[in-house]
Image: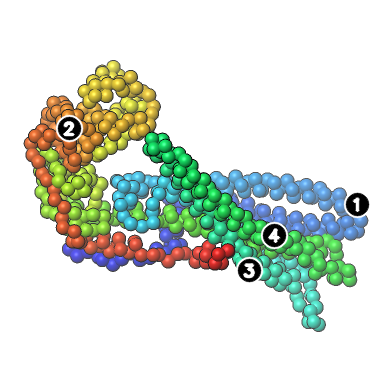
Amino acid sequence: MSEDTTPAAPRRFLHDVTHLALPYWGSAGGWRPRVMTGLLALLIVAQVALAIRLNIWSADLFDALERRSTEHAMAQIGIFAVILLSMMATNMGHLVVKRHLQLDWRRWLTTRVLGSWMEDARHYQAGLIPGDHANPDGRIAEDIRVMTEAAVDLASTLFYCLLLLVTFVGILWSLSGWFVILGVPVPGHLVLLAFLYAGIGAVVAFVLGRPLVRATDNRQTREADFRFELVRARESAEAIAIARAEAPVRARLGFRFETIAAAWQAQSVGLARLIAFSSGYAALAGVLPILVGTPRFLEGSLTLGRLMQSAQAFQQVTAALSWPVDNLARIAEWRASVERVLALDEAVQTVTLEAARTGETAIDLDRAPGPWLGVDELWVAEPDGTAMLSALDLRVERGERVLVDGDPEAAATLFRVLAGIWPWGRGHVYLPADAGMVAIGRRAFLPEGTLRAALALPETQDADQDAAVIAALERVGLARLTDRLDREEDWVDALSGAEQQRLAFARLLLLRPQWVLLGDATDSLDATAADAMMRLLEEHLPEAAIVVIGEHPGSAETFNRRLSLHRAPDGEILLNAVSAKRKAAQRPRARSLPVVDWLRQGYGND
C-alpha cells in the first residue's frame, strides 16, 4: 500500500479562520449568535442615526443662537436631552450585547478547541510533532480570548465607521456647496479635503507608528523574559537556597528588569511622538473645516449652524477614514492570536488524521475482550516516521507476569502503544476492553481534590470501603495518609515520586483489574520496595496479567518471562507520509497581513 508523500499545502489564513470559528453562527452555535449579531448591528445603526441627529441638532442650535431666538434655543435644549438619553441607552445596550456575544463565542470556540485537543491523547501526541504550537494552555486561555474579543470589536467598529462614512460623506457634500479654486468652481470640496486630510494623517501615523510597533513588541518580549526568570527562580527555590545563590539570581532578575526599563523608555519615545501628532491631528480636524468655511459664512452664503454642522461632519468623516490606522495595533494582536490558535488546531488535526490511519501502514488496535493481550508483527516509529522497533511479537495471558526491558526509549514507546496513545507504526495490537485494563506510567494521574478521589473511588463514607482504602494504603507503606482521605490537596506536590508510585499500587489493589500494564512505574523505588509492590499484586491479584515495561529496579526472578527490546537501526523511514508532513511543518510559512510585519521591522536602530 503506497503512501501519499505530498506535503500539506500552506495554510490559507482566512479560509482556516472561517472553518474554525465561523460555524458558531451556523447550526453548531444555534440561533443565539445570529440573534445577538443582528441586535448588535441594529444598535450600531441606531448609534449612527443618533450621530446624524446630533449633527442636525448642532446646526439647528447654532442657527437659533445666530438669530438670538430664546424659544428655539430652549427647544433645542429639550431635544438634546432626548438625544443624550437615547445615546446613553443605545451605548449601554451596545456594550451589553457586544460583551455577551464575545463571551458566548469564546465559550463555544474554547469548548470546540479544548474538546478536540483533550480527546484520545491528542494533547499528548500534538506535543510530539514539530510546528509552532507550543504552550497550548496560553493559546486556549488567552489567544482564543483575544481572537474572539478583538474580532467582535474590530467588526463592530468597522461597520460603524463604514456607516458613518456613507452617511456623513453625503451630509458633508451637501454642506460643501461650490468652492472656487483658481477660478474653477469645485463641488464637495470639504469631502475632498477630508479624504486628503485623513490620507496625510494616515501616512504620518504609519511613519511614526512603525518604530512604536517594534518597540511595543520588544517590551512585551522583555516582560515575558522577566516573568520566565521569576518562574524559574520559584521552581529552583530549593537548589538556590542550598547553593546560597540568592545574590547572582537577584542580580540576574535585576538585569532582566532593567531591560524592561530600556524597552519602556523606547516605547515612551514612540508614544510621545505619536500622541503629539494625534493630539494636533484631532484638534486641527475640528478647526480646519471652520477656517475653510469662514469666507462663505462671512459673505452670507453659509449660516453659523451649517458651518458648525460641516465641522462636525468633517470630523466624523476623518474619524471613519482613520479606522485602519487607529486599529492597526489591535489588528496585529488579533492576527497573532488567530495564527497561534490555528497552529494548535492544525497540530491536533494532524495527529487526529495520523491516529485514524488504517490498513498496512497503521497500528491496528483490536480491543475485543479476549483471553490474552499482545502484539503481532508490530513496527513502531518515532513521530517523524523513523523506525524504532521492528517486527515485534508478544502474547501475555491471564495470570502471567512479564517483564519487558532493554532500550529505555523503545520500551517507553512500546508502553505507549499498548496504552493506546501512540499512533505511529504498523502492525496489530490486541488489547482487552478498557474497563478490564489499567495502565500506569512513571507518574499516575493524581487530580487535585481529596485523596479518596485520587484513588479513583467515589466520594462516599461507606465503612467497608474506608476499611479497604486504609488497608490498601497500609499494605503499600502509606499508612501515614490514612487520616487524610478527605483532605483536599494537590497530591502531586504533596507526595514524593516514590510515594506517588506506591499510591498507584494502592489504586490497583482497590480497583482489582484483570490486566495491569506498568511503564517505569517502579523506577522511583528501591529494589526491595519494587519487589514488595510486585509481591502485593501477585498476592492480591493472582489471576491478573501483569506486564512491566521499562526500568524495574527489583529482581527479574519475580516474573515468568522476560523480553529485552533492541532499537531498530537509525535511518529507516517507516512512515513516508508522516515524514513528509514533518518536513513540510518545519518550513517557514508565508505570514498573513504582511503590512503588520513590515511595520514591526521598524527603522534600523530606532
The residue at which mark 1 appears reads as 70
User: Looking at the rendered structure, which numbered label has been put on residue 276?
Assistant: 4
Tag in front: 3 or 4: 4
Are dots 2 and 3 in contact, CB under 8 Å? no
The amino acid at mark 4 is: Ala
Q: Residues within 10 Å of mark 3 (few under 14, many from 20)?
A: few
**Which residue is located at x 79 percent, y 56 percent?**
57
Q: CA distance from mark 4 to mark 1?
A: 41 Å
Apparent side of residue 299 relative to residue 514 in the rendered image (left or right): right
Q: CA distance from mark 2 to mark 3?
A: 74 Å
Q: CA distance from mark 1 to mark 2?
A: 101 Å
349 up-or-down from 206: above or below = above
Q: Decide which of tag 2 and tag 4 comes sooner along the chain.
A: 4
Q: Decide which of tag 3 and tag 4 comes sooner along the chain.
A: 3
Apparent side of residue 564 relative to residue 184 in the rendered image (left or right): left
The residue at which mark 3 appears reads as 203
The amino acid at mark 1 is: Thr
**Which residue is located at x 35 percent, y 30 percent?**
494
Q: CA distance from mark 2 to mark 4?
A: 73 Å
The amino acid at mark 2 is: Ala
Q: Secondary structure at mark 4?
A: helix
Compare residues 333 and 90 and report the one nearer the observer: 333
Tag in front: 2 or 3: 2
